[in-house]
Image (cartoon, rainbow, N blue to C red):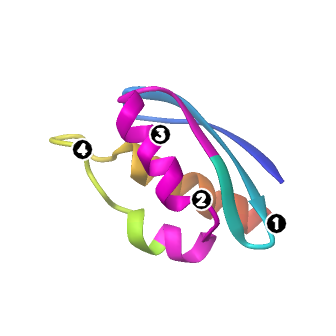
Amino acid sequence: MAVNYKTKGTCSTKLEFDLREGKVYSVAFEGGCDGNLKALGMLVEGMDAGELVGKLKGLRCGKRKTSCADQLATAVEQALAQA
């Protein structure tokens, strides 16, 4: 399932990924810290979706209440609930 998610509270404005058989693939962010977000996408490639949520949910960026990683976890969590 292809997922498009509009991020909230981060420098990135949107993220996209594929969820197949409970695993996350092809993570891509629009905006934000390009190198860091490409690295994040590479690190989570093929990761179990539940594991990703467990590791990234709640991470904050500076004084913000969220981060790009947290937004990815939120998007994956929502996608899992809809699957």
Task: Identify residue for label 2.
Answer: 45
34 within the magenta span: yes
Three-letter amino acid code of the residue under disc 2: Glu
Q: Along the polypeptide, which appears first: circle 2 or circle 3?
A: 3
Q: Residue at x 47, y 39 (%)?
A: 38
The residue shown at (58%, 75%) is: 50
Residue 72 relative to residue 20: left or right: left
From the top left corner, tell me how far across and down residue 56 is, in percent.
Answer: 40, 63
Q: Which part of the image, by quadrant, shows the N terminus?
A: bottom right
The kind of residue tagged 4 is: Cys
Which element is circle 4 on?
A: loop
Mark 2: few/some/many CA within 10 Å (<14, 14-19, 20+): some
Tell me which amino acid carries mark 1: Ala
- Cα distance in 3D space between marks 1 and 3: 26 Å
**Image spot of residue 4 (x, y percent):** 70, 38
Q: Earlier in the sequence, mark 1 or mark 3?
A: 3
Give the residue type that dot 3 points to: Lys
What residue is shown with label 4?
A: 61
Q: Earlier in the sequence, mark 4 or mark 3?
A: 3
Image vertical order of residue 77 relative to residue 54, above or below: above
Provide the residue designation for mark 3: 38
- Viewer-nearest of discs 1 and 3: 3
> How far apart are the alpha carbons under marks 4 and 1?
29 Å
Provide the residue span drawn in magenta. 27-53
Nearer to the camera, 3 or 43 = 43
Residue 8 position in % (x across, y down) = 46, 35
Nearer the N terminus, badge 2 or badge 4? 2
Contact, CB < 8 Å: mark 1 with mark 3? no
Q: Nearer the viewer, residue 28 or 53?
A: 28
Report which residue position mark 1 lands on: 83
CA separation in Å, label 2 and label 1? 19 Å
In which quarter of the view is residue 61 placed? top left
